[in-house]
Amino acid sequence: MKNKIKNIRYGLFIFLFSMMVSCNENEFLKEVPKDFYSPENSYVSMANFESSFTDLYARVRAIQYNGDEYENTLNLLGTDIIVCGRGTDDRLGNYATAFVPTNWAVFQLWRDWYKIISNANTMLSRLDASELTETEKLKAEAEAKFFRGFAYRNLVYLYGGVPLIVEEIAEPKADFTRASKDEILNQIVSDLTDATANLPTIDQVADGKVSNVVAAHYLAETLIALGKYDEAITAASVTINDPNTDLMTSRFGSRASEDPYDEMLKFTQPGDPYWDLFQVGNQNRKSGNKEALWVAQMEIDVLGGLLESTGGGPNRWERNCDPVGWMTFKDPDGKEGMRGIPLSDYNGGGRGVSFIKCTNFFLFDLWQSDFDNDIRNAPHNIVRDLVFNNPASAYYGQSAVLPDGTSTSSTWTEQNWRWYPYPSKTTTPGQHPDGIFANKELSILTSGAGNTYHDMYLLRLAETYLLRAEAYLGKNDKANAAKDINVVRTRSQASSVAVADVTIDYILDERARELIYEEQRRLTLSRTGKLVERVRLYNPQNEDNIQDYNALLPIPAAEIEANKDAVLEQNPGYVQ
């Protein structure tokens, strides 16, 4: 019996001793998910990484085109060329009341760009432990760094110096502090330099994916901000000189054999390559478009593609940007001059609701020297006329617009936001999908219209030419700056700019003519230090309520309050 007890004690001792020396408590207690995705099992194969990149592309697309409409339009409204369509304090129409630390869109932009940074950092931190080949790692690293650099690019121009985070954050943290603007810019240069060197060339990537020439463009932009003009010219030239990129100077794509036509407005215009750029199906390289560098994919009736042929989807660019003149727009006698329903033609464009519109500076002043010959100002590219289309009206078939841009309509007198000229690139005249036609023969759309049914540009080569011109101007090489500007203007049949007339303001004017509703205008004006000056010069709605400190957005109040273990400083001028 004693031996039995002794053996039991000895066996128990051996068991306990082996447990103490052989069990790693940390490993034993570590939870490894088996039935759901987590950072531990989500970044193993290249397919895992590609899924995460798909999410990053979707997030960029959402910020600029299909998320909350206040976030989509924050970088447009209150600038020199775009204002709140209805002239009220909502939709960011007044700097004093809208551009404040508690504004939802101000917080939303901050949060969404940092989410992209967070996801990119997680991907970068998981590369070494993944099963990727060295070639796959290099590509994934370059793509993740591109998105991190691109996100910081947006943050630094909008908010100034911001917290710099380049590692995965695995635990709660509430002691962020702001890095300097130059520190952020130098981090962007580092990320985009690697992306330019290691991303595939544009002919090797699928439509919608970033390539080395996209990274090189944004690298050039960042180098300009740092005053490194020669390096910026070199980077921009990578994009411009690539054999797979070119400005579209000839007709191409789905409507290359068609001329823009409108029965109500009584015009048939010669088509042009600028018009072709914005026709359905023409945004990607598969259409022959070598000017498109980065395009947000808006697929119709495809899961995750955002758009539905029956009118659904959040890409409400047509709704936001176009006038609502089709609805209860009365003739000079006060009778119904319009049928009261949106049309799929240039007389209606679609279901606009006049939320945002172009300033008179854009609509009139910018075109004075080339009003009739610049194709970007042709009637099919900027719609300047509206015709009464109700057969019951005594004014049926007559123009509702006077030469000075005002209207003969009694409705317009009371609510002048119901009609204004608009760039047709925001809609798809004659190309709305069948599912939203109430009567296709009459071009009548259902009330569910309002989306823009083509893919949306994030970057075109024309912008790179204007960016390189900016770099040449920075080193006072106006001759080469003029050459780059005139490449863009020649395509548009506009007169050439003289070398002596090249200034940063001229380049900003040309960007407006070429890139209206494509570029994030606030970002451009903040980057060049011109926001406040040009709003006061060209934007009557905001000239008196913008302040010097509005050159930057406020740091969101919610972020400052949540950062309890350190001071996250507010931008000067804003009251917390």
Image: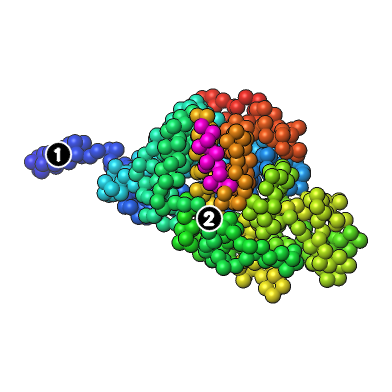
Residue 259 place in picture, x, y as percent:
62, 66
Q: Residues within 10 Å of mark 1 (few under 14, many from 20)?
A: few
- Callout 2: SS: loop
Q: Quadrant of residue 108?
A: top right
Residue segment shown in magenta: 477-489
The structure residue drawn at horizontal position 34% and vertical position 44%, both measured from the top left corner, is 198
Which residue is identified by label 1? 14
Q: CA distance from mark 2 to mark 1?
A: 84 Å
- 262 above or below 42? below
Residue 490, percent across and down? 57, 49
- Please tell me how crowded label 2 is: few (under 14), some (14-19), or many (20+) other residues with Cα within 10 Å: some
Residue 134, percent from left and from top: 26, 46
Residue farthest to the left?
3
Instruction: Residue at 72%, 43% (x, y): give it.
Output: 365
State the residue at coordinates (53%, 46%).
Answer: 487
Is residue 91 among what the camera can see?
no
Residue at numbered disc 2: 249
